[in-house]
Every structure is written in structure tokens, then in C-alpha cells.
């Protein structure tokens, strides 16, 4: 503001008022100072109120926390009491369960062991197989018969149009007239008209034969001409009272027609044949229906004349006087009752399938239906008489009602026979047939083969004998070790010839037996082995067990010399985990491998004892030291003598693609911590990189070094430091696949 005032003063050239400006400036500064003090005081008050609010908030929060801590403490005390009670209840339940288990064990021990279902003999197996074959053949014959049946089921609809008529018979009336009058009566003549219908139904075709059933509505038209003779006119005459003998009224009806309409709902039942070589078919049968619609409408022209017999005497040829000439006669339609209709039906037509390429079957045919029962359900109209017209005596002689000819008393003896002939168009859709397939024949059970090895001298079974079975046709070889009973169940084998022999340590090999295996047999070949006479020599034997379950394991042992690691012997344990080797006293390295187990390497100092060796089942979390892995001193270079160890580990990972591992390097305590950490990491990564070069996916392996942090022995001795210098791996994931041991 000060600057603005100065600028204005300079612009206006008013230097003389500078003292006044200085005074104004001082006044403004004083006002600003007072305002600043007021703002500072207000700010201090605001901050003081804020601090007071924060103190109150902190106090409330502390109180809330104390209450919460008290509630938590109370909750923990209640939980501790509940846990204590729960532990007591659990202990009681365990005691009760143990007592119950002991009781159940005692009861189970007292019960006889359940009998296992005996294995079928060769004859029983053949009988069972033949029964299966017979059942399947019977089923397949039914399926083949069904598939070979020349049959089809169809649903469709049709329409028909043509000439229709309602043939009437027994309608008419004739009676002599009174004295001086003409005879009274009428006759009728049937004339047809256009008719037709619609229907839907089901059709069965078996080979060439047809059967059709359904429902249809047919519409009939007929025109009944009414006359009193050949002249085509219908005449009535009446004498008017009181001049009945003197003045006669004549009614002449010309072109008098009774138009009849009938509608029937019908159920057709037709049988016929569909020819194969030519596209023709025919059907015949009956149609049973009931009338739903019936009405009659009479129309025509009429004229009237009066005959005055008194006037005849006075005038010549002047006795007739015309009242109405050619007047139109039209009356509303009246109802006609049609009842049951049974019609004979026939049709012959053409299949259009060869010309019209469409999914539905198209048919066009000529047909004829004739109702052979009387379809008229007679109900006389009110005031009906013997003729279709009626005079109103003592009333207007020109006003008279008209009835249908079918509603007169003369129609009591009448009959109506519906008739329809014309062209029929039908569309049929084939229904899909049930999908059936023949069942395959079961494979013939292969014959079974067993081998029994025994000592020739003692006739005792030779457990652990190795049996060789060679199929002569394919030269396939099966090696089996006999159990303690000396039996080898070779199992199912193809029919044919086999060479069978057996060997066992301390015995001469058996003679090779040629044996022919036939179908549905269970042959046990007996092989005697002769003992080799020799001094008692102790050979290295091993029992292989699961370290957790102590159960025997079928494992492979590769024996090498401790001195030069030369491979000496490879053997497969029997099903009871026993391995007998020809190795005599000495120091050996036993490398054990088994499907699903971690490889194991043990140093054996053999004199006479049988060694019990234990293997660890592969599962997540297992830590394995890589044996016989050598590095250059204080370097990460893997030495060539490590080839076998790295090859075995790579093969294990390649054969088990779901296994993932974590590689960890360790060192002894010689050197600085930093140097040992770097060395351990380098050696772990060297193992990982070597495995990658051998084809193992990199994402399946992780590596780290732990330096000297996790020793397994004392670092104060050379032996301890050697044990601490190691590379291990931990199985982190085994996946869902069965682990295959390839070490």
C-alpha cells in the first residue's frame, strides 16, 4: 500500500505532501501491528484449546485401553479355564478310547480271521469266461436284430380337398290331395360341392407294410334339390276358409334347394403297402367319426296364384289370378344333427422323395371316403310336418315358415351317407431310432504260470532263487525271485512255448525246461536245484527296511570297492527286502535305490554279519546330502570324480519332473565369515548350473549358501571340518506323480 501511495504522489507531481504521506504510512503501520497482535493471541488460544482437546482424547483412549485390557484378561482367564476343562475331558475320552480299543483288540483276536475268496481254478475261469461270452453274444444278437429291422416311425400332417356330398335316401313325401285339389308331396335330388379336411397322425412302416392312425376334421357340402316331379317344381295348394271350395291358393316353388353343411371329427385306421421298386403306395381301412357341425339353408323362388271357382261360370279362361310371381325365398340356416359316422376309406398315391430332396417324406395321393352308416341323428323341428313348408291358416297367406328337408317328419326314415373324394397332400417326419451298439467281447484270460524251485536233495523250497522265463516267440525275458516258499508267480502269460530255468547262489543252475502254455491253464513248473559242494564261505547279505515303518523294501544295491570305487555287484532284493551278494570279507560301499525312496550310500566293513540298512521314503521336507561331490580347494569348480553323483542326481530329477529342490551349500569355519558365505553360495549355484546343463528345468531348483552357520560336526578336527564342507538339497515339492528312483 505504501508503494502505491508513493507512485500516485510521484505521478501527480505533489512532492509537497510527502510529510502527510509519511504520517499516513505510520498510521497504517500501527494498525497493522495491532492486528498482528490480535491474530497472534487468537492463534495461541486456538493452540491451547487444541492441546486441551488432545489431552482429553488421550485420557479417554487410555481409559478405553485399560477397559479393553481388563476385558481381554477376563476373556483369557475364561479361555484358560475352558482349556483346562477341555484337556481333562480329552484325557478322559482318550482313556475311554484306549479301554475300548483294548477291548476291541481282544475281541478281534478271539475271532477267526476272515476267509479270502479263493482264486478261481482254470476250469472255473473258463466256465466264467464262456458264460460272459454267451451273455454278450445274446445281447449283441438282439442289438443286430434291432438294427437290421426294416422299420420306421413317422409323425406327420395332411390336408385334403375334393368333391363332397351328403347322400340322402328315404327323404320325400307323397299323399293324395283333397277333393278338387292336386296331390301333395316332394322329392329330392343330391348334388355335391367342394369339401376337404385337415389331419395329423402317426404312421408305422415295417418293410413294405403301412399302418396309419390319427385324427382329422372333414368338411362336407351338399345341395339337395327339392321338387314334386320331373318339372323341377314343388307345389302346394290350400283352400282358404270359409271359401275352401270356391277360392284355392296355389304355391309354386321353383329352384328350391336345401344347402347342407356337415363337419366330422374322425379317427382313421388304415393299412396298406409302400412299394420299393416304384414310388407308389396304397392304404385302405375305416374312419370312425362324430358330427360336430350340421346346418341347412333353404332357398329358391316361389309364386302364388288364386283359383276363384265362383268366377269360372261368369268368365271364360279368367279363373286364375296371380298374387306373387318369382319372389325370392330365403330363410335363416337351421341346425341339422349328425351323429356317428363310420366310413370306408381308400387312397393310392406317389412318394415324392426322389424328386423333392427334403428331410420330411412328401406324399400326394387320390383318396375316397364313404360313410356306410346313417349319420343323421333325427330331431324334428318345431312345427315340422311332412313337407319342408307350412301354411299359416287364418293368417297372411304369403307368410310361411320353411324347414330343412332333414327336419321334417318325413325324415324319420331318412339316411345320410357322407362322401368325400379328392387329392390328399401329406408330410411325414421320420422319428429317430434308438441308438444301440454291440458290446465288444471280453479279452480271453491269459493262462497263468508259476515256478517252484526246490532243493533236489532235501525237496525243500529254495527262497530267493532267481527264475528266468523266456518266451520263445518273442525272446522276452522275465526275471523273478522266489519267495521263502520257493514259489515264483510269473502271472498271466500269452499262450505258447517258454524256456524256464532257475539259479541260486550255492546251487548249480537248473536244467532249462521247455514248456507249452495252453489256454485256460494254471501250470506250476517244478525246478530242482542241486547244491554246489563247497566249503562254507560267508558272503555279504543285507536286509533293506523302511526307516519309519521298519517294513522290508524291494531295493537295488550297487556294490563298489571302498578302495577304488570299482563296481563289483548289482542285486535286487526279494519282496522281503533281503539281498544276498557273492562278496566276501572286505570293505565296500553299498549304494541303495528304491522307487519312492531317497538313495542311500553306506560304507560296510564285512566279516560275517548280515547288515540291516534303512532307507528314507521320499516326501516334502527331506534333506539329502550329495555324497561323493568334490570341489577344488576353496573354489566352486566341481571335480571330475563327482560325475557319478551329479549324473545320478540329474537322472533322478529328470525321471521325476514334479519334484522341486532347494540346494544349500555349507563350509567349515576356516576363513572369514564373508569368504565362507561367498564360497557356499558359489558351490550351491555350481551344482544348480551343472544340473541345468544336464537338462533339468531351472525353475525347479533354488540355491543358497549358508557358509559356516549350520555345522554338523566339530570344526576343531579335520574329520569334523570335512563333514561340515558339504552340499545338501531339500525336497520342497513332490507334486502328484509317483516318485521314480533312478539313483
Image (cartoon, rainbow, N blue to C red):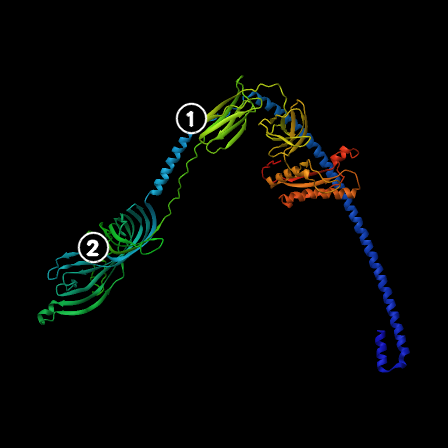
| Label 2 SS | strand
Instruction: Pick the quarter of the image with the C terminus.
Output: top right
Residue 316, located in which quarter of the rendered image?
bottom left
Between 199 and 402, the residue placed more toward the observer is: 199
Q: Quadrant of residue 195?
A: bottom left
10 Å neighbourhood of mark 1: few (<14), some, or many (≥20)? few
Report the residue at 37% width, 45% height from top: 433
Q: Secondary structure at mark 1?
A: helix
Residue at coordinates 19% horizontally, 69% vertically from top-left?
325
Q: Is 444 placed left or right of 276 in the picture?
A: right
Q: Is residue 477 visible?
A: yes
User: Residue 408: image x %, image y %?
Assistant: 21, 56
> Circle 1 sits on which residue?
123
Residue 156 on image: x %, y %: 34, 51
Q: From the viewer's perspective, is 360 left or right of 299?
A: right
Q: What percent of the width, then of the height, locates residue 687?
A: 68, 42
Q: Judge whether 288 appears above or below 298 on screen.
A: above
| C-alpha span from label 2 to label 1 | 84 Å
Q: Which mark is residue 94?
A: none
Q: Badge 2 local density, few (<14 within 10 Å), some, or many (20+)?
A: many
As drawn, which residue projects farthest toward the top?
A: 458
Q: Nearer the viewer, mark 2 or mark 1?
A: 1
Does residue 140 appear left or right of residue 345 in this picture?
A: right
Which residue in the protein does label 2 denote? 168
Amino acid at each position: 500500500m505504501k508503494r502505491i501511495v508513493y507512485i500516485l504522489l510521484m505521478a501527480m507531481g505533489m512532492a509537497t505532501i510527502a510529510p502527510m504521506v509519511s504520517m499516513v504510512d505510520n498510521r497504517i503501520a500501527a494498525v497493522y501491528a495491532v492486528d498482528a497482535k490480535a491474530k497472534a493471541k487468537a492463534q495461541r488460544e486456538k493452540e491451547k484449546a487444541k492441546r486441551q482437546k488432545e489431552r482429553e482424547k488421550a485420557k479417554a483412549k487410555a481409559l478405553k485401553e485399560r477397559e479393553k485390557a481388563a476385558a481381554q484378561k477376563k476373556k483369557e482367564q475364561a479361555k484358560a479355564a475352558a482349556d483346562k476343562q477341555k484337556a481333562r475331558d480329552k484325557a478322559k475320552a482318550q482313556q475311554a478310547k484306549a479301554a475300548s480299543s483294548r477291548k476291541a483288540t481282544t475281541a478281534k483276536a478271539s475271532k477267526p480271521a476272515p476267509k479270502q475268496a479263493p482264486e478261481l481254478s482254470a476250469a472255473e475261469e473258463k466256465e466264467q469266461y464262456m458264460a460272459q461270452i454267451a451273455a454278450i453274444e445274446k445281447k449283441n444278437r438282439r442289438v443286430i436284430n434291432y438294427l437290421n429291422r426294416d422299420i420306421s416311425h413317422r409323425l406327420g400332417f395332411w390336408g385334403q380337398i375334393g368333391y363332397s356330398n351328403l347322400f340322402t335316401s328315404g327323404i320325400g313325401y307323397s299323399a293324395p290331395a283333397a277333393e278338387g285339389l292336386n296331390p301333395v308331396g316332394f322329392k329330392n335330388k343330391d348334388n355335391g360341392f367342394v369339401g376337404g379336411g385337415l389331419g395329423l397322425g402317426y404312421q408305422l412302416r415295417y418293410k413294405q407294410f403301412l399302418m396309419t392312425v390319427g385324427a382329422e376334421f372333414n368338411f362336407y357340402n351338399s345341395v339337395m334339390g327339392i321338387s314334386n316331379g320331373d318339372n323341377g317344381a314343388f307345389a302346394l295348394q290350400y283352400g282358404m276358409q270359409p271359401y275352401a271350395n270356391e277360392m284355392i291358393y296355389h304355391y309354386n316353388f321353383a329352384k328350391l334347394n336345401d344347402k347342407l353343411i356337415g363337419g366330422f371329427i374322425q379317427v382313421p385306421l388304415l393299412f396298406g403297402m409302400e412299394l420299393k421298386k416304384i414310388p407308389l403306395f396304397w392304404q385302405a381301412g375305416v374312419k370312425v367319426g362324430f358330427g360336430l357341425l350340421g346346418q341347412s339353408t333353404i332357398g329358391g323362388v316361389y309364386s302364388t296364384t288364386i283359383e276363384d271357382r265362383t268366377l269360372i261360370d261368369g268368365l271364360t279362361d279368367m279363373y286364375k289370378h296371380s298374387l306373387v310371381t318369382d319372389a325370392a325365398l330365403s330363410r335363416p340356416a337351421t341346425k341339422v344333427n349328425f351323429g356317428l359316422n363310420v366310413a370306408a376309406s381308400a387312397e393310392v398315391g406317389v412318394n415324392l422323395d426322389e424328386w423333392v430332396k427334403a428331410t420330411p417324406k412328401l406324399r400326394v395321393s387320390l383318396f375316397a371316403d364313404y360313410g356306410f352308416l346313417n349319420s343323421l341323428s333325427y330331431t324334428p323341428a318345431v312345427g315340422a310336418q311332412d313337407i319342408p313348408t307350412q301354411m299359416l291358416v287364418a293368417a297372411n297367406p304369403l307368410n310361411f315358415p320353411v324347414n330343412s328337408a332333414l327336419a321334417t317328419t318325413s325324415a324319420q326314415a331318412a339316411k345320410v351317407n357322407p362322401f368325400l373324394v379328392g387329392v390328399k397332400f401329406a408330410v411325414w417326419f421320420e422319428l429317430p431310432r434308438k441308438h444301440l451298439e454291440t458290446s465288444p467281447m471280453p479279452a480271453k484270460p491269459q493262462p497263468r504260470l508259476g515256478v517252484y524251485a526246490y532243493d533236489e536233495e532235501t525237496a525243500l523250497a529254495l527262497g530267493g532263487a532267481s527264475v528266468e522265463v523266456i518266451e520263445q516267440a518273442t525272446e522276452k525275458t522275465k526275471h523273478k525271485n522266489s519267495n521263502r516258499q520257493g514259489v515264483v508267480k510269473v502271472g498271466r502269460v500269452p499262450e505258447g512255448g517258454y524256456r524256464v530255468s532257475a539259479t541260486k547262489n550255492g546251487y548249480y543252475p537248473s536244467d532249462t525246461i521247455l514248456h507249452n502254455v495252453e489256454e485256460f491253464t494254471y501250470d506250476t513248473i517244478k525246478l530242482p536245484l542241486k547244491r554246489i559242494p563247497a566249503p562254507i564261505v560267508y558272503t555279504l547279505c543285507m536286509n533293506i527296511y523302511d526307516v519309519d515303518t521298519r517294513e522290508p523294501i524291494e531295493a537295488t544295491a550297487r556294490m563298489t570297492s571302498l578302495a577304488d570305487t570299482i563296481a563289483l555287484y548289482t542285486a535286487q532284493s526279494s519282496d522281503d527286502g533281503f539281498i544276498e551278494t557273492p562278496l566276501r570279507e572286505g570293505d565296500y560301499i553299498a549304494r541303495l535305490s528304491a522307487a519312492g525312496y531317497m538313495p542311500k550310500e553306506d560304507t560296510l566293513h564285512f566279516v560275517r554279519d548280515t547288515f540291516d540298512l534303512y532307507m528314507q521314503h521320499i516326501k516334502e521336507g527331506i534333506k539329502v546330502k550329495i555324497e561323493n561331490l568334490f570341489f577344488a580347494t576353496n573354489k566352486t569348480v566341481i571335480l571330475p570324480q563327482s560325475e557319478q553323483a551329479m549324473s545320478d542326481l540329474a537322472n533322478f530329477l529328470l525321471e521325476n519332473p514334479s519334484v522341486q529342490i532347494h540346494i544349500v551349500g555349507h563350509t567349515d569355519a576356516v576363513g572369514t565369515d564373508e569368504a565362507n558365505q561367498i564360497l557356499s553360495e558359489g558351490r550351491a549355484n555350481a551344482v544348480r548350473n551343472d544340473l541345468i546343463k544336464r537338462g533339468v528345468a531351472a525353475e525347479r531348483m533354488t540355491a543358497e549358501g549358508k557358509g559356516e552357520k549350520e555345522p554338523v560336526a566339530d570344526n576343531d578336527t579335520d574329520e569334523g571340518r570335512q563333514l561340515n564342507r558339504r552340499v545338501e538339497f531339500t525336497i520342497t515339492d513332490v507334486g502328484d506323480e509317483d516318485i521314480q528312483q533312478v539313483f
